[in-house]
Image (spheres, rainbow, N blue to C red):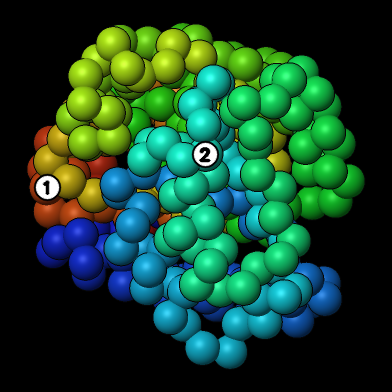
Amino acid sequence: MIVRVFEDKLALSRAAAEQAAVALRRAIQEHGRARIIAATGASQLDFLDLLTKKGNIEWPRVEMFHLDEYLGLPITHPASFRKYLLENFISKTGITQIHLLDGNGDPREVISRTGKSLKSAPIDIAFAGIGENGHLAFNDPPADFQTEEPYLIVNLDEACRRQQVGEGWFADFSEVPQQAISMSVRQIMKAREIIAVVPDARKAQAAKLCFEGEISPMAPASILRTHTNTTVYLDRDSSSLLSQGTLAAFAAAA
């Protein structure tokens, strides 16, 4: 794993978008297509916007899988990740090969159908974030590091649900769904390349927990340290609690 630190969120997002564009072009050149996993959330907005503006990406050759979605939330709700991806990524690129998780459908059927498509061929690039509680996708602590199932129904912990209110997706804690469909940790780790975009001071404690503590289900994103082709993008605020020794060690991995 490599950690790169930038002055602010925009600089971080610009660099991550450039790496993602290069990876997309390379996958299309080598395999005839690029299979990707797309993350959502406030932390990803600048990154996705900048990526959609990159040239020379054959978006019709890109197949996109959905990372996670709330159960029981209609696509019209401002917090719907389907709505987020349609507005902030799909409509801007013209991607037609999309696998969105229908949180209003039969969750078992959704998991089975989408998981079968996901497992049909390797994933080239996974875009990810890290939650304030250290979660990876909606795998809150203690995360399941063992299951080989591509998608799970998960219970969202209080810290995760409060983060959604803090980011403005819900007006009140009681409105946040208690369950979601999430891609499993092992499935995310099967991607050939992972690009994690982690800006803002509210992620500083999670960064310290995941990158200086033990690799543990209690710090789900700590598992990224075992992936051989992961780049984590931090800004000055999100990296503020990490020691210089930690930053130097991860920078040296490049």
Q: Residue 215: x, y in percent?
A: 44, 23
> In the image shown, does 141 or 45 lie closer to the viewer?
45
Category of crowding for the residue at label 1, using alpha-carbon neighbours closer than 10 angstroms: few (below 14), some (14–19), many (at least 20): some
Q: Which residue is drawn at 74% across and 61% down?
A: 97
Visible in this render: residue 226?
Answer: no
In the picture, the disc for residue 237 is 1
Instruction: Please give left or right for residue 191 compared with residue 4 in the image.
Output: right
Marks 1 and 2 in Cβ contact (< 8 Å): no
Instruction: Please give left or right for residue 221 compared with residue 116 in the image.
Output: left
Residue placed farthest to the bottom in the image? 56
Can you say whether 50 is above or below 81 in the image? Answer: below
Q: Which residue is drawn at 33% across and 57% down?
A: 45
Q: Which residue does the numbered mark 2 point to in the structure image?
A: 75
Q: Residue 113: x, y in percent?
A: 83, 33
Q: Residue 185: x, y in percent?
A: 60, 28
Disc number lying in front (1 or 2): 2
Can you say whether 18 is above or below 195 in the image? Answer: below
Q: What secondary structure is marked by label 1?
A: loop
The disc labelled 2 sits on which kind of residue?
Answer: Ile
Q: Residue at x 51, y 88 (%)?
A: 55
| Count of marks overlaid on the render | 2
Instruction: Please give left or right for residue 67 compared with residue 30 in the image.
Output: left
Q: CA gap, disc 1 to disc 2?
A: 33 Å
Visible in this render: residue 179?
Answer: yes
Q: Name which quarter of the figure residue 102 lies in.
A: top right
Q: Which of marks 1 and 2 is nearer the N terminus?
A: 2
Q: Residue 211: x, y in percent?
A: 33, 34
